[in-house]
Structure formats: structure tokens, C-alpha cells
Image (tube, rainbow, N blue to C red):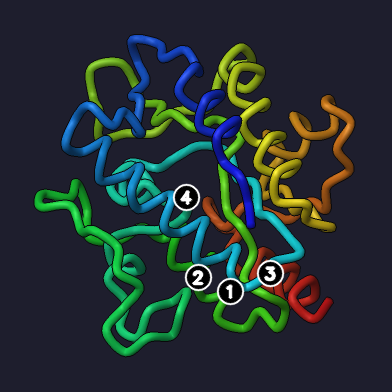
Amino acid sequence: MIHLTAFLGLLDAVPVAPDAEQLYDASTPDGALRRSNLLRFLSLVDERRPDAVLIGEAPGWRGNTNTGIPFTSVRELSGRPGLVTGHPDGDGFLAPEHPTAPWEASSASVWKALGQWERPLPFIWAISPTHLFVAGDRLTNRTPRPDEVRAGTPVALELIRASGVETVIAIGRKAEHALAASGVEAVAVRHPAQGGAAVFAEQMAALGRG
């Protein structure tokens, strides 16, 4: 069983810039929902004895920022049957009442690839766990600054350590470089955004066969 006490402690300690948003503050209704969904997701995946973890860049405003689960929009969250358990009534996640968007292209690409994944469903996380936006417009995404990558990396490293997985897959260059700088040898795949969906799908299909 995965133990997340240290992971959550590090997550709560990540500094949040003025042009960023803390997603997992349990003292707020939205934060409590995201945190509940994240913990349920990690628990459900852990039950399936995963051997891999996907590490992306940062939460997107159309997906993770709504649901609390990386690369997961409301569309995937509410999937019937459940994308994690296959249960006809879904996975038991909490749906946000007023999501900022109903779906996200990157989330769709990731879960389409995982639908063909022949190994146990992997954990999913982001190297920078806060929602990073262009100042003044929360409905945007921006690239993590170097200090934000450094601040978020220990959270990802703790998830990798606690999970004991054998394979770490970095989605995009930011995740790949941050993990390499910390001594983690990750398999790099193309990020599905900005025209990378086809290459991402091919690379994930090869990895999913083990």
C-alpha cells in the first residue's frame, strides 16, 4: 500500500506565486474536492499494482485544475464505465459544480493512450503541481519558471519513491530535464499538446506493451 503522508506534506509546502494557484488546499471547497479526487485516484491505481508513473509538466486549466487529477478533465472524471476501475457506475470521483471547461485535448490524448495500455494503469503526476497562469487571467496556462520546477520536483520524487515503480515516463522536456537533474533516469515521450498527439500515442503504445 502506498503511503502518502510525506508526499502530501511536500505538496502542501510548495510555494505559490501570485500568478499561480494552489489546487489542493483542503480548507476550500474546490481544494477539498481536488484533494479527495487525487487521493482516490492514487489509491485506486495503487490497488492495481502499477509498475510505472507518468510525470507531466503542470496542471492545465481545462483539466487537472478542475478535477485534481493530472491529465484528467471532467469528461474523463465522469466516464462510464470508470476509466480506472471499469465499474459501470464510474470511479466514484467528485465532479466540480462549475468547471472551467468540459474537456481538455491533452487529457483526451493521455486517456486514449491508456485505454490501449497493456500494463497496470500507471500513476500520473506533474513536475509542477500548481496551476500556472498568465497574470490576470486564470483561464490560461503558462510554462513553469525554473524556481517553480525546482520547488515542485521533490513532490514528484516522493511519489516515485513511495510508489516503488520501476518505470518513470516523462511527458515533455520540462519533466524530463527536472527528473534528470535529480538523478532519475526517465523514459521521455513527446507531450501530446501542440501537434504532438500522434507521436505521443505511438510512443505510449510501445511503452504500454512492456
Q: Secondary structure at mark 2?
A: helix
Amino acid identity at mark 1:
Leu
The tag earlier along the polypeptide, 4 or 2, is 4
Give the x, y percent position of residue 13: 49, 17
Residue at 78% x, 32% y is 177
The image position of residue 39, as x and y in percent, is: 43, 50
Residue at the limit of the structure toward the left, as seen here: 97
Q: Nearer the viewer, mark 2 or mark 3?
A: 3
Bin the neighbour count of mark 2 within 10 Å (Cα to Cα): few under 14, some 14-19, many 20 and up: some
- Which circle, 3 or 4, is nearer the viewer? 3
Residue at label 1?
114
Looking at marks 1 and 3 on the same chain, the residue that comes earlier in the sequence is marked by: 3
Q: CA distance from mark 1 to mark 3?
A: 15 Å
| Residue picked out by circle 4 | 70
Q: Are marks 4 and 2 in contact (CB under 8 Å)?
A: no
User: Which secondary structure, mark 1?
Assistant: helix
Residue hosting label 3: 49
Residue assigned mark 2? 111
* First along the sequence among labels 2 and 3: 3
**Element type at marker 3?**
loop
Compute the Cα span from label 1 to label 2: 5 Å
The kind of residue on which mark 3 rests is: Arg
Asked whether disc 1 touches disc 2, contact meaning CB atoms under 8 Å apart, the reply is yes
Q: Earlier in the sequence, mark 1 or mark 4?
A: 4
**Amino acid type of the residue that numbered disc 2 sits on in the rendered structure:** Trp
In this rendering, the answer to whether 11 lies above or below 94 is above
Distance from disc 1 to disc 4, alpha carbons, whole Å, reads 13 Å
